[in-house]
Structure formats: C-alpha cells, structure tokens
C-alpha cells in the first residue's frame, strides 16, 4: 500500500473548519483514500473514504485532487470532541485481508 | 448494538509471564484483525482472520505471539514469556468482509514490568 505523509500536528478554533492535508504521491489507480481518527484512550474510528470523487457524510468531507496525489479531510465545524489523531490511509479493495497501514497521523487540537 | 469489546482493558505482567487478551467482535463479522500500538505511534498490524482461518500472521513480531479464533467469533491473542518491549495497547478490529470498514475495540493496555 502507498505511503502517506501528514503534518504531525495542527490546531483549530472551535466552530471553525478543520482542514487536514495528506500527501499520497505514490498512490496507484486501484487504491482508495481512507481516513480514521483516534480519540484519546479509544480505538480508531472510521470517518470516510473515497477513490476519485469528493465524498461527504455526516462527519466530514473528503476532497481528492484530480491527480489523486493528495487529499484533504474537512471537518466543517470543529468541536472540542473532534480533538484526536487523524490517520490518512491508502488501501486496495481486494477481498484478501486488508489490514490498515497507519502512519503517524495528525494530532488535531481543537481549542475553545 | 454492541460494538467490539476487549478484555481485560488493562493488564500488568511481570517479565516472563504469559498473557491472554480476548476480543469479542461484532456478531456476524467475518474478518478480525489484531493491531499493536506503541506509545505515541500509530497502530501496527499483527494478524488477520477470516472466520476461523488465520490468513495472515506476517505482523506477529516473534514466535512468542500466537492468535486463535477457533469458532470464527471470539479471538484470543496470547503472548508467551512477555518482555518489556511487548508493552503496548493491543487493538482488535472486526469487519463484515475483508475490505469493509473496520470497527475497533477500546484496546487492552499491556504493561510488562
């Protein structure tokens, strides 16, 4: 699976949009971009995933560049409960066991 | 409904002891994964089951680590002769099928003294 690069940490003001970037310049055509987050002392939690098109769900939006070499996770109105480590992961969708390959992630601190 | 549960939540072991960590996946989930998370790092894959079959154990760090899922539901990760470097959070995740969304348990924090 392709490697991803994320900033180590970011701050965001409560109520503002949090934009978390991820570089995946070696992504291949059949690899999806996934985002998980891990709140302190909890297991990781799925947020969203996409292949080429932008995606939106109740938690976040995912913007993937046209060349698919980078993406941005957007939390439109960050709350204090969004403080967590956010992991950008690329993976294929074959039916074999697709483990998740986590990097270091971005530690997002939402401040009042 | 019930999510993935793990027990115990915390385990302290003396170096050289054997430990067993349990994972109860979401009912009906075919795939089950174990990950190890050292302090300040992202989780790292250990092993994967599809039903009762262990299809990938490439991430197990040594032959002291052993995992089983005999009836295709509950899984146990066993670590023999624990070492200090085994101290970590051990996370279990399950999914409906191989590449579907993985649901994680809260983890077991193992401390080896």
Image: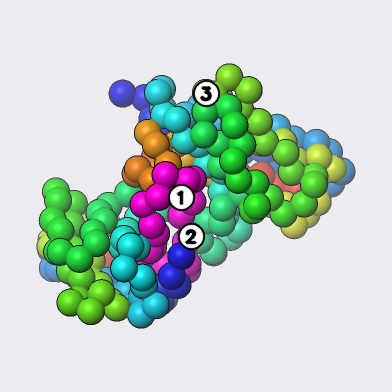
The disc placed on residue A86 is none
For marks 1 and 2, give the one nearer the viewer.
1
Magenta segment, which residues? A86-107
Against A56, is B27 above or below?
Answer: above
Q: Which residue is drawn at 58% across and 27% down?
A: B52
Query: Residue under circle 2?
Result: A101
For marks 1 and 3, give the one nearer the viewer.
1
Q: Do labels 3 and 2 share a chain?
A: no
Q: Quadrant of the N terminus of chain B?
A: top left
Query: Residue under circle 1?
Result: A98
Q: Mark 2 lies on which chain?
A: A
Q: Position of residue A50 (x, y in %)?
A: 23, 59
Q: Position of residue B26 (x, y in %)?
A: 41, 27
Q: Mark 1 near mark 2, Cβ–Cβ under 8 Å?
A: no
Task: Give B105 or A10, whichever is nearer the viewer.
Answer: B105
Crowding around mark 1 (Cα neighbors within 10 Å: few <14, some 14 to 19, many 20+) is many
Labels in figure, total: 3
Crowding around mark 2 (Cα neighbors within 10 Å: few <14, some 14 to 19, many 20+) is some
The disc placed on residue B73 is 3
Q: Mark 1 lies on which chain?
A: A
Q: Residue at x 74, y 43 (%)?
A: B65
Q: Mark 3 lies on which chain?
A: B
Q: In which quadrant of the rendered view does residue B68 lie? A: top right
Q: Do labels 1 and 2 share a chain?
A: yes
Classify residue B59 as left or right of residue A71. right
């Amino acid at each position: 699976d392709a490697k991803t690069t994320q900033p180590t940490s970011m701050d965001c003001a409560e109520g503002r949009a949090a934009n978390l970037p991820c570089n995946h310049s070696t992504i291949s055509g059949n690899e999806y971009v996934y985002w998980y987050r891990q709140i302190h002392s909890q297991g990781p939690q799925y947020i969203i995933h996409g292949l080429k098109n932008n995606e939106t769900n109740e938690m976040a939006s995912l913007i993937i560049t046209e060349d698919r070499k980078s993406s941005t996770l957007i939390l439109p109105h960050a709350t204090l409960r969004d403080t967590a480590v956010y992991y950008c992961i690329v993976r294929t969708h074959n039916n074999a066991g697709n483990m998740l390959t986590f990097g270091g992630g971005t530690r997002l601190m939402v401040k009042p | 409904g019930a999510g993935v549960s793990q027990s115990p939540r915390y385990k302290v072991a003396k170096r050289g002891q054997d430990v067993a960590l349990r994972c109860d996946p979401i009912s009906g989930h075919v795939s089950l994964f174990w990950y190890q998370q050292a302090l300040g790092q992202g989780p790292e894959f250990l092993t994967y089951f599809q039903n009762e079959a262990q299809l990938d154990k490439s991430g197990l760090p040594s032959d002291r680590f052993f995992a089983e899922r005999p009836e295709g539901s509950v899984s146990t990760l066993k670590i023999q002769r624990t070492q200090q470097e085994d101290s970590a959070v051990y996370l279990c995740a399950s999914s409906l099928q191989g590449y579907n969304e993985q649901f994680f348990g809260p983890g077991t924090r193992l401390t080896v003294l």
